[in-house]
Structure formats: structure tokens, C-alpha cells
Image: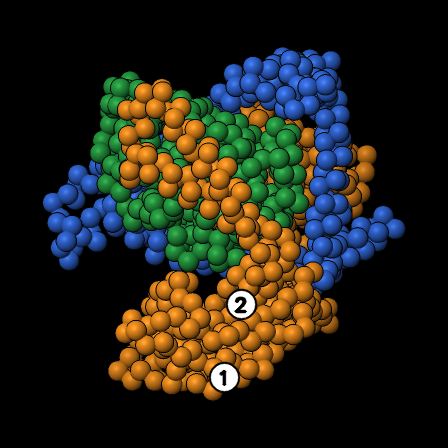
Chain colours: A blue, B green, C orange
Amino acid sequence: MKRTVPLIITFLGGVVLIIAYFIPYTQAWGEKAAVFFDVLAAIAFVLGGGNLLKNHLKKVSDRVAGWGYSVICLVAFLVTLTVGLGKIGVNPNTQFSNYAWSGVYDQVGSPFWWLYEYGFKPLTATMFAILAFYVASAAFRAFRAKNFEAILLLGTAFIILLGRTYAGVVLTGFIPDDSAFSGLKLENFTVYIMQVFNTAGNRAIMIGIALGVASTSLKVLLGVDRSYLGSGGD
Amino acid sequence: MYEFLKNLDRRWVFLLMLLSVAVPILLNARFPEKPTGLARAVFNEIEKLNEGDPVLLAFDFDPASEGELGPMATAFVRHCAEKKLKMYFMSLWPVGPRMVEDALDRVVRPDFPDLKYGEDWVQLGYKSGYEAVIKVIVTDLKQLYTTDRFGASIDSIPLMADIQSVQDFSLVINISAGYAGTKEWVQYASTPYPDIILVAGCTGVQAPLLYPYIPEQLPGLLGAIKGAAEYEMLVLDKYGARDENGELDEPGKYFEGIRRMGPQLIAHVLMILLIITGNIIFFIERNREGSS
Amino acid sequence: MKHSRVSPLRLLFLLALVSSLASATHGQEADDGVVSSPPRPPSNLRAVDYPMDKGEKIDLTWDLSLDDPENVSTYLVYRSRTDKEIEKKIADDRKKFIDAVKTAATEGLFGEGWKDRMADLTQEQLTHVREVRSRAAERAETTFSSDPTSEDNVYKFLGTAMPGENEFVIDKLDGKKSYTFMVKAVGTDLSQSAGVVTEVGLTPVLQWFDGEWNTSGGRFWLSIIILVFCGAVVFWILRARSGKPIRVRKIAGLEAVDEAVGRATEMGRPILFVPGIQDMNDIQTIAAMTILSHISKTAAEYDAKIEVPTARSLVMTTARETVQASYLTAGKPDAYNQDLIYYVTDEQFGFVAYLSGMMVREKPAACFYMGAFYAESLILAETGNHVGAIQIAGTAMPAQLPFFVAACDYTLIGEEFFAASAYLSGSPEELGSLKGQDVGKIIVVFLMFIGITLFTLAALTSANPGLSSIFRNMGDFLKNVILT
């Protein structure tokens, strides 16, 4: 029973979405199914929030390694939740001035805006910026001319790295724009590599992925692959 | 030296990367840009429009990718404002509206104070549902957007009177950092409705995945800072520098993409040097192993 | 003879023609002073619903004008406007009229190019301008009139048909509205015939199946391709059930799973499994759950600790169910600890920050990254590499594959990732589905070959335009109709 009901729901959901694609009359059914998912995911937020609290409170109480971070996480979570949901410090919308909560939650100058502007924004930008360091480290460590294919890859990498900056323009600036060899100018050659070789490779991978997605979906819909509901075919 | 490089602590690499990015920023190194065909295509699609044409600007990115996409957002908004196009902003990312506000703060509010909210531009705000939102608004925008971002009824906004769906816009400009973004706009807007003309700006990682859609479903594409810098050059060539003194100011909000290409150049050169160094170590190591 | 597309050149010509027609009136005097004779109108205009569409199209046919082709240069096709559209048109016309009157009044005062001189005006002159414009607007408001039943307001121009053509497909109609249609013939001197109108209104009908097979946008061909592909998958699953052996090539990344779990057990360190950052509606997350099921079963057998942080609450719930069932299957239900599968945050970089910190602190011996990843892929893989973990990644995000390939020990690329569940379970049914997938690949290769051949032949036979266009049209049909 614990397996059968989810399998039936999966099958029905999948069939409805497929039918909705081909039969215009049922188009709205597909949208309804998507809305059902959104509702479920929204309810799951509560579950997630509760789990977050439980997990970090446990870490603090057990004094596990790094429990101080858990304290910071809990404080940040609760403060953001309170000022965001409560619209603290938000002025009412001018059109509905009688309603205290009619303003937008991230109004400029409000505590939530402040948290966003001076907390969230620089922190996420920092995490993204860390990529530059990791890319350099990975390139230094992993990019080796071990065989012919790797040498081709390295050559292409150099062309793209140079062609995507002014260095490419300078290095091959001696080739006239209107000559038969203008395609070899690094900035043009980069675009050619990206649009032809890279696109061809990507398309091959994407075709494989699309077939894999279709096949996996079919297995899940037909109940052939039930491992996501627990291991084995029982 | 060989032993030092072989067992190089990655923090040395990090330090080099920090310097290669920080020094050009501090020295304000700026290199000229030569616009490529894709940037020209984006520029021309906007240039083709007439004064008063409605343009949908979908900002699907967040603060994390602001460094890569912020400059092109500024350039897009400025170009539309210079062309006196009607701008409609929306987002499929929760923090997208804040990115819109940032662009408005940089461009519209200080430099185009005559443009009025509701008459020349409108903030439709964020809608959850990723591509499902696109699927609905391509045929009926007001089904999902019943109010603007600030809670005002959509029917009370003069700019919305002529807009029923995305098909009513003369152009859709999407700036995207991932899912949901340009790929979804191509799949659910410009492909099933060829009348919808879409141009986009995206992060460097995404760009190769969008090339297959050029030019039919996506006439123009700006890839990362490089694309933004090229587009900035085109906008600057046509409309000139627009600062308080009418001169290039430093650092200059309309030169941000060009400015950020400086660190990118040095960082790319560093990457090449690192790869070469790594390979020299690799070959020495292999030779030693071979001889032993 | 059906047509809904015209070539750009022809379109330019038609646009020029239509714009000149806008000013032409019925029976006007031609340049040479002779009153022109408009062609006789087309007749017997018929509108029928377009078959097998999603209720947006109507087919229009008519009998040609008796003057076709001698005195017909084109046919103009119109449809009736809805009441709301008429209201909007009148409002637009009113606005245009008022603007034109205001502009004319201002130009009368200051001449052309007055806008550029605005900045030089004194405050007093500006006030005067405003008054003049306001008075002009008031005057225009009172003089403007428009009859909502006039032909210009009721009928909307849709497109043109060339002489000899008597069909037109009307698209983008509202399935809830009723429409009438009108066709006029235009003479060689641009004079127009009277319009022939359909007598009864027609509403486009929504068919049960969106199965247009000969135009772009229909779903007939896609349904055929899906049926063939799904049929192949089902066929091979059934064949596998009957006991025929199926061989699958070795996938190094999956062969290494046992090694990775064993290593974690030996070192007494945890295994980290990250199921991507997307929700359960993403097929990659589902594929990740199927792999988690196998890995957690192996971990349970080895008595290794497996930790699953998630970026979505629903994924957490599903992962708990999956891992619990795996422990049960492995015969160690008591060893299952649900606290090791937990939600972190939906925020992409918040999730990465947590994982990086956790990896540095706990130093997992094996890291599995399976699912949909974005920019965080390299941060995770580099951190894992730094802590010395054996790393296996699998994703169908093409943009992230290079990062995983560079920084991980093994990477499941695209379809390998989806094949992992079948490979790990070894179940004949699942392996059969992989064989069915190969049939899909054969179809793709076959279509690519046909397309390339047709366009190559079109290019090679360019000396023979008739033959070349046959190949090109076939290629275009494959590309624009079957595959879109």
C-alpha cells in the first residue's frame, strides 16, 4: 500500500501531463498539476524550516564542532523571518494607506531591505566570486596534456581565453579585417569555435540527455524503476 | 623550484588570482572593445524599434551574478530609455525585482527623471512558477499579473492598457543567470510564438548552451561581461557618455562592463600561465619517472 | 494553394501595395484623369473551421473575381473585430487625432521642429504653449467622431492573397468569439472592389487532438516520434523480462561506487551525497534518488554513515523515505538515522557555503554529487578534492560537466547519469529500457542523415532549380514541420 498509492499518483500525474500536451482541451489539467506541485512545495517550506530549527538547535545543544555557526544561522533565520513576514518598518502602500501591511516587504529603508542589501547581497556575491579562485586552482591542477585529445583541448582553451579579451585583438591584430584570413583573428576564431565545435558537441550531449530523460520518465511512470520509493523491486 | 611548484599550496594560486583581479581594478585598467556580430545583433534589434514601442525586460538573475550581468542590465535600460521605449520589468527570480530597482536607481531615476512610473515604465515584479509563468503570460499576461509590484491594480496603470500578452511587446529582453531564464524564454515564448522577438544577455557558462538557438529563436545574445562590454561600446558610440558633466566619469556606470574586462584580461592570462606551469611540472615528472 | 507565409521580397511589395491602398478610395480618379474601373468582387466566400487544431484557425475560400487575372493585382482579407477591439480602435484613433491636432496647433505657432526649441522658451511662452495645446485638445475632443459600425472600424485587415489564389488560413483567433470575414479584389490600378462578406459568424473550434501534420507547430509528428520511442522502450523492457540477456558496457564511475563506500568505511569517515539543488519536479533529482537508493543500501551493508543535505524540503522527505527503505532492504533498519538527511536552505550559495564548511570540518571520505547543479558544482568539487575525498559526480547539466570532469575522480555524463540506476540494480527490466533508449538514438541519427542528405542534394543540384527546390522543400518539411 505504501508503494502502490505513490505509484498510482505518479502514473496518473504523468499521463495527465502527457495528454495535456497533445489534447488542447485538457491543457488546463497540466497547469493544475503544476499548481498542485507548487502548493505541496509551499507547504514543505514549513517542514524545511522546522527541520532547520531542529537540526541546528541539536547541534548547539550537543556542542558539536562548529556549533557557533549554528547559532548564527538560527539568529539570521529567525530575524529575517520575523522582519519579512511581519513587514516590520514597512510603510503602507499609498493607495491603501489604511492597511498597515499593504506595503511591499522589501521596501527601501525597511529592516528586510537592509538585511538584503547589506547581508544577503554581499554574501551571495562573495560565494559566487570564490569561483574565480577555484577555477584557477582546478586549471593548475587538472589541465594536463596527457594525450592528443587533451592537447587539442588545451589549445582550444588558450584560444578561447585569449579571444574573449582584448589580448586576442592585439595578438592577431596584424590580420586585416577584410582579408581571407580574418576568420583566424582570435576574436573571430573564438566565436567560430563556440558556435560550431562547441554547439555540435553540446547538441550530441543534449540529445543523449533528452533520450535519457524520456527513458527515465517512462520507467518511473510505468513503475519499472521504483527505487526512489525505496530500494529493490518489492 | 620544481619541488615547490609540484607541491604548491593552492593558496598561492588564490593569491595570484586575487592580485590579477585587484590590481587592474585599483589601476582602473581599461581596454578598448571591438563589438562582435552577436552584440551588434542585440543592439540593432533595439535600434529598429520606434519611440513608444513596448519592451518587456525580464531580469532573471540575483545578486550573486550581478557582477557578470549588472553592467548589461544598466546598458539595456539606458538604451531603451534613450530610445524612449516603454519599459515593462518582470522577473522569474524572487530577488529579480531588486535587480530591476538597482538598474532603475542607476539609470532612470538620476538620468531620465522625466520618465514617469505607469506611463513610461512599470515594475510588474516577481511571479513564482518558473517556466509555467512564461507559458501563461505568452497568451494572457493579466491572468497572472493582476497587480504591479507595489500592489496597484494592473488595470489602473495606463501603460498596461494595450498589453494583453507577451505577444503585444515589440521586443523581449531577457537577462538570465540560469533556471528559469533565457532557455525557458526561448522554449516557451519565441519558439511557439515566432512573432515574439527575444534578445538576451547571460552568464558565460550559459552562453554555449544558447548558441544552438541563434539566430532563429534568439536573434542576439550577450555573453557575460565580454558581451556587455561590446554592447556598452555600441550604446556609447551612438548615444555618447551621459554623465553629469557630459564626460567620461571614473569609474562610470555606463562603462562598467568595459572596466570589468580589465581584470578579466589579466585573470585569463594568469590562467594560461598556470596551465602552462602545471604542464611543465607534469612533463618533468613524467620524464623523471621514465628515466627512473 | 494554401498559404500563410510569403517571401520577404513579396512581403515588401505587398506592404507597399497595402499602404498605398490605405489612401485609395473606391472609384477614385487615376493619375491620367480617367475614372478607373474597379475589378468585380470575388464571390461565394466560405469560412470553415480548420481541422485538427487547438481552436485558433479558420479556413477561408472564395470564388475568384471574374476579372482575375486581367484586372486583379491582389486580394485583401479581413476579419470582423470584436466589440472590445472596436472600442480600442476608436480610442486609439481618438488619441491619434487629438495628438495630431495638438501638434498642428503648436506647429502653427512655432513652426516645425518646435520640440527642439522648447528648452529656449521663457516660462511665459511655455504657459502659452500649454494653453494652445490644451485648447486644441478640447476642440479635437468635441470634433472627433467615429461610427462603430463603419466598415473601417468593424473589419481588421489580415493579409493578402495573390491573383489566382482562393484560400487563406486565418490564425490566432479567439476560440470564444464569433467572426465574420470579408475579401476584396484590388485592380491593377489599385482600385478596390466591393467586399464580399460571410453571412454567418463562425467560431473556431477546439479539436480533441492538436494534430496538424503539414504545418509548423502541430504536434502530430511529435506524437508519432514519442509513440515509436516509448514503444521501443516498452518492447525492450518486455523482452528483457522474458529472460534474454542484455549486455551493458562498463561505466567506470559506477564501478567505483563500492570502492568509494568501502574506503569511507575503512577510514571511519562519512559519505556525503548531494542530490543537486532542484526540487522533486526535476527528473535529475528523481534520478539522483534512484542512485541514492543503491548507494545507501551499499552503505548500510558496509555500516558506513551516509549524510544527505538537501536544498529543498520535498527532496529531504523523499530522500528519507528512500534511505530508510534501503536500510530495511539491507536488513539493518535500526542503523537508519533520519537526522543525517536534512534540509539546509533553498538559497543556492547559502547551501554551498554550508556544504563547504561541513566538508572542511567533517572531511567526508567519499562525495557523490548527483542531480541538477549550477555554479556551485566547481566550489563543491574543489572543496571535496581539497579534503581528499574520492568524488563521483553525475549530472545532466551540460554547462557543469567540464567542472565536474576537471575536479572529480569520476563523472557520469548526461545519459550515463540516467542509466546509473539500471546499471547499479542490474535488473533486466531497467537494462531493457537502456536498449530501448538506443532505438531513440538510431531514430535521431537516421533523421540527421536524411536531413543532411536532402540539403546536400539541394546544394549539388543547384544547376537544376526544379530538382533542387524539391530536395530543399523536403528538407524544410523535415526541419520545420516534423521536427518542430
**Where is residue B155, by image quadrant?**
top right
Q: How far apart are labels 2 and 1 at the CA level?
A: 16 Å
Chain under numbered label 1:
C
Number of the label disc, if any, that sits on residue C78? 2
Residue B220, visible in the rendered structure: yes
Measuring 61% from the left and 14% from the top, which residue is drawn there?
A111
Which is nearer the N-term, disc 2 or disc 1? Answer: 1
Q: Amino acid at mark 2?
A: Tyr
Locate residue A177 relative to residue A65 in the image: left or right.
left
Q: Position of residue A194 (x, y in %)?
A: 34, 50
User: Dot 1 corresponds to which residue?
Assistant: C64
Measuring 43% from the left and 85% from the top, which residue is drawn there?
C67
Q: Are marks 2 and 1 on the same chain?
A: yes
Residue B12, visible in the rendered structure: no
The residue tagged with tag 2: helix, strand or loop?
Answer: strand
Q: Position of residue A197 (x, y in %)?
A: 35, 56
Locate residue C440 relative to residue C453 in the image: left or right.
right
Callouts 2 and 1 close, C-beta under 8 Å: no
